[in-house]
């Protein structure tokens, strides 16, 4: 390396860079067809090498974010090959599906078969564990190239907090007033998540086969731009769930105004459901509007 010109690879890149810079600085200079073909080949070579370096970079160890550092410390969570990444992603999707079915059965049991506070507490503890596990797994997946961002990540942190508050809500008249509404909402939420999983996984499979989506993209509990096909099927279920969150918030707020209300959990759950509604509703609405405008622009261009 003391003499860079002794390395054919470096010499080739230096000549390539000089040729392209000359072309950029002197656009009026006439080049022979052979030179044009050579430059085109060199530019293609640069793009291929850039893609190769980007792929190599994806497997280099990365520093954990704040959340993973707090939970796992400085443990390296970067998966070192594509097969490991895909296997972890698929295991994450299966975990969500299995827990969604378990939560559906559990909430059905609590709602219609048994009415015990201890069983309700066990259900809420399962919700806390589920959402905590999701946040950790999603952070690992993001470190390894998954592109789930923004609100769809934050809502799992908020859902963890909400489930923890429900877990600490003591038995009483106010808890019993909200219990059936809460369990029915959980039943509906599990049902919608089950629909989302199969619908979104089908969309992702088709888009990946066409090369239009990243292989580490995930199914999410919301609406994203790549789910535009079959829009009329899923959106009504999503918006109904969003407004149910608003209904939960209003119900809890009215309960908080009752003279006998002494539990702080009532106001905290009301605020949490309101934040969930606003985040889910406006994020979904924004994605739909953005996709609609993009389709309008494409139509005009055609």
Image: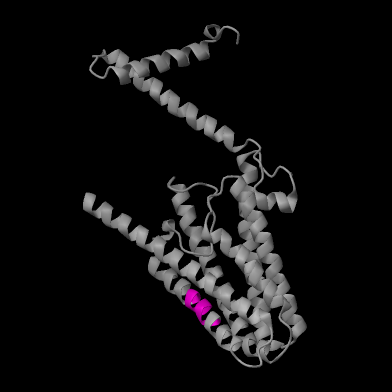
Q: How far across and how far down the image is residue 266, in percent?
A: 63, 82
Toward the right, the furthest residue is: 118
Residue 127's place in the image compared with 85, above or below, is below
- Residue at figure coordinates x 27%, y 15% from the top left: 33
> How was this image coloured?
one colour
Magenta-colored span? 241-248
Residue 40's place in the image compared with 178, above or below, is above
Viewer-nearest residue: 100 or 143: 143
Viewer-nearest residue: 235 or 280: 280
Quarter of the image holding residue 130?
bottom right
Can residue 302 be seen at all in this image of the molecule? no
Magenta stretch: helix, strand or loop mostly: helix
Q: Is residue 41 left or right of residue 151?
A: left
Q: Is residue 57 left or right of residue 29?
A: right
Whether the magenta-drawn stretch holds residue 186 is answered as: no
Is the N terminus in the top left, top right, bottom left or bottom right quadrant? top right
Viewer-nearest residue: 58 or 1: 1
Q: How far across and how far down the image is residue 286, in percent?
A: 40, 62
- Residue at figure coordinates x 45%, y 14% from the top left: 14
Quarter of the image holding residue 137?
bottom right
Q: How far across and how far down the image is residue 262, in percent?
A: 69, 87
Can residue 215 be seen at all in this image of the molecule? yes
Q: How far across and how far down the image is residue 3, in percent?
A: 57, 6
Q: How many marks?
A: 0
- Residue at figure coordinates x 46%, y 57% from the top left: 203
Residue 16's place in the image compared with 264, above or below, is above
- Residue at figure coordinates x 45%, y 59% from the top left: 224
């Amino acid at each position: 390396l003391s003499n860079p010109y002794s390395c054919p690879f470096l010499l080739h890149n230096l000549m390539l860079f000089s040729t392209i810079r000359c072309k950029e600085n002197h656009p009026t200079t006439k080049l022979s067809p052979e030179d044009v073909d050579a430059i085109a080949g060199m530019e293609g070579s640069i793009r291929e090498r850039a893609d190769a370096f980007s792929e190599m970079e994806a497997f280099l160890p990365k520093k954990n974010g704040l959340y993973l550092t707090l939970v796992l410390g400085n443990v390296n969570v970067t998966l070192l090959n594509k097969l490991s990444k895909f296997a972890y992603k698929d295991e994450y999707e299966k975990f969500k599906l299995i827990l969604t079915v378990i939560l559906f059965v559990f909430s059905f049991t609590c709602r219609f078969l048994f009415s015990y506070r201890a069983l309700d507490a066990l259900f809420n503890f399962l919700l806390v564990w589920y959402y905590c596990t999701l946040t950790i797994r999603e952070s690992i997946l993001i470190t390894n190239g998954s592109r789930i961002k923004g609100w769809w990540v934050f809502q799992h942190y908020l859902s963890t907090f909400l489930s923890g508050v429900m877990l600490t809500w003591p038995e009483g008249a106010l808890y019993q007033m909200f219990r059936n509404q809460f369990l029915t909402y959980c039943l509906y939420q599990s049902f919608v998540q089950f629909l989302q999983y199969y619908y979104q996984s089908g969309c992702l499979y088709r888009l990946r086969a066409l090369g239009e989506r990243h292989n580490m993209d995930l199914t999410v509990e919301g609406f994203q731009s790549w789910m535009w096909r079959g829009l009329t099927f899923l959106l009504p279920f999503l918006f109904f769930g969003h407004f149910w969150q608003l209904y939960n918030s209003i119900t809890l707020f009215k309960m908080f105004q009752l003279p006998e209300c002494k539990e702080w959990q009532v106001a905290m759950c009301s605020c949490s459901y309101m934040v969930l509604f606003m985040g889910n509703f406006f994020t979904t609405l924004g994605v739909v509007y953005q996709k609609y405008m993009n389709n309008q622009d494409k139509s005009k261009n055609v």
